[in-house]
Image: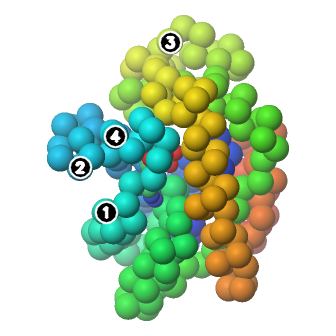
Amino acid sequence: MARIVIIGPPGAGKGTQAKLLAKLHGVPHVSTGDMLREAIAAGTPLGEEARQYMDAGQLLPDDVMIGIVDARLQAPDAARGFILDGFPRTVAQAEALDALLARRGLPLTAVLRFVVPQDDLVRRLAGRRVCKDCGTMFHVDDGGPAAKGRCDRCDGLLYQRADDEEATVRRRMEVFETQTAPLGRYYAGTGILRDVDGSGTRDGVFARVKAALA
Ligand code: AMP
C-alpha cells in the first residue's frame, strides 16, 4: 500500500515524480496546487481566495488546506493509497494529516524529501511551461513542445504559471525555507523519511525514487 508524501522546494520536480509514482502504484496523485488551480479556473469562492495567496507566493491558511485534503482523502479512489504532492507544507498540516490518517488506521508509508541545488530550482521554474488542458509540464530548454507552445499529448496551449515569475519564485523559496523545511525535522524521527537527490533527468530521478522506496 502506497501512502506517500513528497516534500521539497518549488521546482524540485515533485509534480513530475508524483505523477510517475501514482501511475506505478495505481493510486491517485493528490496535488493541492492542482486542486487550487482548478478552483481558480472554475471561478469558485475557494478559487477566488486561493488566487490572492498564490499570486503573492504565500501559503493558504492551514485550516482551509486541511479541510480540502481531508475531504479528498475520503474519496473512494484514495482508499487504495495516494501520492500527496504539495501537502503538508507546514508542521501544523503535517500534524493534522497524521491525526486524520491515524483515525482511519492508515498511516503514511513513506515521506520523500527532494534535495536540489538552488540554481537548478530557479532555472527549472523560469523555463517551466504547463499544458492548460492536461497539466503535463515541459521545459523550454528541452527544445520540444515548449518551443512551439503546444502540448504534444493533447495539443493544449502551454502557459507559464503566474507564480513562476521571478519575484514570486523568490518569495516561494523564502516561504519554503521558513515554513516547509521544518517538516524535515518533524518527519526525521518517524523512520519513513527518505532523501532523494532530485537533480538531473526525470528518468534518473525516478530511478532514485524507486530505489528509495524499495
Ligand atoms: P504548488 O503547485 O504545489 O507549487 O502550489 C502552488 C501554490 O498553491 C503555493 O505557492 C501556495 O500558494 C498554494 N498551496 C498549495 N498547496 C498548499 C498547502 N499545502 N498549503 C498552503 N498553500 C498551498
Q: First in sequence, mark 4 or 1: give its number.
A: 4
Mark 1 lies within 8 Å of ligand 1 (Cβ measured): yes
Residue 211 in picture, x, y percent from top left: 79, 64
Quadrant of the frame with the N terminus: bottom right
Q: Are marks 4 and 1 in contact (CB under 8 Å)?
A: no
Left or right of 5: which side holds 98?
Answer: left
Left or right of 104: which side holds 109?
Answer: right
What residue is disc 3 on?
A: 149
Q: In the displayed structure, would residue 206 be above or below residue 134?
A: below
Q: First in sequence, mark 3 or 2: give its number.
A: 2
Residue 52 is marked as 4
Closer mark to the observer between disc 3 and disc 2: 2
Quadrant in which residue 186 is drawn: bottom right
Residue 46 is marked as 2
Q: Are marks 1 and 2 in contact (CB under 8 Å)?
A: yes
Mark 1–mark 2 Cα distance, whole angstroms, equals: 9 Å
Local packing at callout 3 (Cα closer than 10 Å; few below 14, some 14-19, many 20+) is some
What residue lies at 54% left-to-right and 73% top-to-bottom?
A: 91
